[in-house]
Amino acid sequence: MRRLGVLMIAAALAGCASHRPVPPARPVASTGAPILAVPPGLALAPSVQQQFNAAVSQLQSGDLRGANRGFTDVLKASPDFYPAETGLGYVALANKQYRQASAHFASALKTGSQYLPALEGQVDAELADGDDLGAIAAIEQLLAVDARREDLRSRLDVLRLRVVQSELEAAAKARAAGHLDEAQRILERALASSPSSSVLTRELARIELQRAALGEAETHARRAIELDAGDAEAVALLGDVLDVEGRTREAVQAYARAIAIDPQPAWREKHDALVARADLEALPAEYRSIGSAPSVTRAQVAAMVGIELKPVIDRAPKRATDVITDLRNHWAAPWILPVSQAGVMDVLPNHTFQPNAVVRRTELARVVSQVLNLLAARRPVDIAAWRDARPHFADVSSANASYRAIALATASGAMKADDDSRFQPLQPASGADLTAAVARLRQLAGR
């Protein structure tokens, strides 16, 4: 690529006696210094024009001090003559005063925003100063005026990639140190130069999620996906944002999309956990409170068995049941009927289920033993061994009518006695008792 400072626009002829635009002169090929053009319609008094042309010649010949004096004098006489301001920029550039050069070019562009010598000089100054962000902005400004500069487009792509990599590293370092505000500033600055970077946008969303700026995090996560629909990390990140926002079902959908792109095991695990939580959130509050409940009701037991062990209940032979008179509009009614039809829980002789009655540990043991009976065909050896077991309980004799159910429930590992071998049969079954028993039954059912 040719040096950006070498321009293809000719300068005005020296000594012109009118205010008409001065025809361009031929460049001085041996010096490599820029040739400054006077745009059509921009004219000077003859004496000032002579000063400008002399300064251009001095710049061409390498007389930087003389050129600096000449351009300065021109600006004193005509402060808005931006070719002279541009000339001062090239003097500073030749002296390796890159920040000063950039300031001169920026000043020239305030008046002549499409002046190619100033635009190219600004690019040179930013590149020489090592300011990638400034160089990106300068090249974009130049390309907006001269779209034919394909050489600059490739340079722009390289700069953008370098900025993205550098700023990502800086942001990651700040984030690791807990400096989230600094990390966000770094990424926002980088995005200003590379607004189409899905990676920068995604990482900004990640920082915003950590800072609990959920609205902004969702916006940027969705923007990252728009920029690159195949960015699985951005899709998974959107799932994380939606999860924190409490939009569990939407988070499930986002993780399903991420897995379809890249089936990472960790994402599958998160997806399954979200599905379970979404299913739980959809259930009534009475069900969601089971885990921490000091005691559980018959309705809660039927609901948990009906939901968690649904395949077992569905496969069970259906027995005829009488009309249950106390289930109208009850939250657990959808599970009580199939559980009673499967013979896991009984309807009372007065045709009631008594859904709000507290379940004792003895009754929970009977429920567990009935489910184990339904699993006998799948695990005949295990079930037979557990049925033959005769564990000792300090508070339940082998003559007790519930002993066989309690023995089967404990032998299978679904329930247990305390350290003193006490089963506490009349103690209310807690939510923890029910949850542990059903978890073991799920395991035995192969779910």
Image (tube, helix red, strand yellow):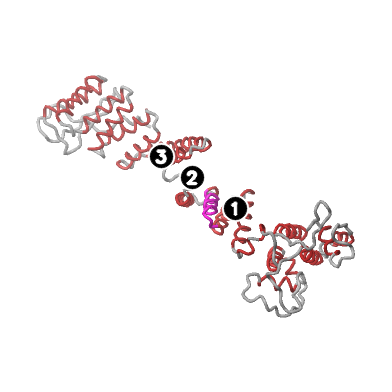
Q: Residue 18: say if magenta.
A: no
Q: Which residues are magenta?
A: 234-247
Q: Residue 235: say if magenta.
A: yes
In the rendering, which numbered label is found on residue 189?
A: 3
Name which of mark 3 and mark 2 comes first in the sequence: 3
Name which of mark 2 and mark 1 comes first in the sequence: 2
Which is nearer the eye, 198 or 4?
Answer: 198
Amino acid type, residue under disc 3 in the picture: Arg
Residue 63, given in percent of the width and then of the height, sits at 24, 19
Q: In the image, 289: left or right of 225?
A: right
Q: Secondary structure at mark 3?
A: helix
Residue 230, given in percent of the width and then of the height, sits at 53, 50
In the rendering, which numbered label is found on residue 211?
A: 2
Is disc 1 in contact with disc 3, using a CB cutoff of under 8 Å?
A: no
Name which of mark 1 and mark 3 comes first in the sequence: 3
Q: Residue at label 1?
A: 259
Q: In percent of the image, x 77 and y 66: which residue is there?
A: 363
Determine which quarter of the picture holds residue 148: top left
Amino acid type, residue under disc 2 in the picture: Arg
Q: Quadrant of the C terminus?
A: bottom right
Q: In percent of the image, x 82 and y 56: which residue is there?
A: 422
Instruction: Give the Cα separation between the discs numbered 3 and 2.
Output: 18 Å
Determine which quarter of the picture holds residue 427: bottom right
Q: How many residues crowd around disc 2 within 10 Å: few (fewer than 14), some, or many (20 or more)?
A: few
Q: Secondary structure at mark 1?
A: helix
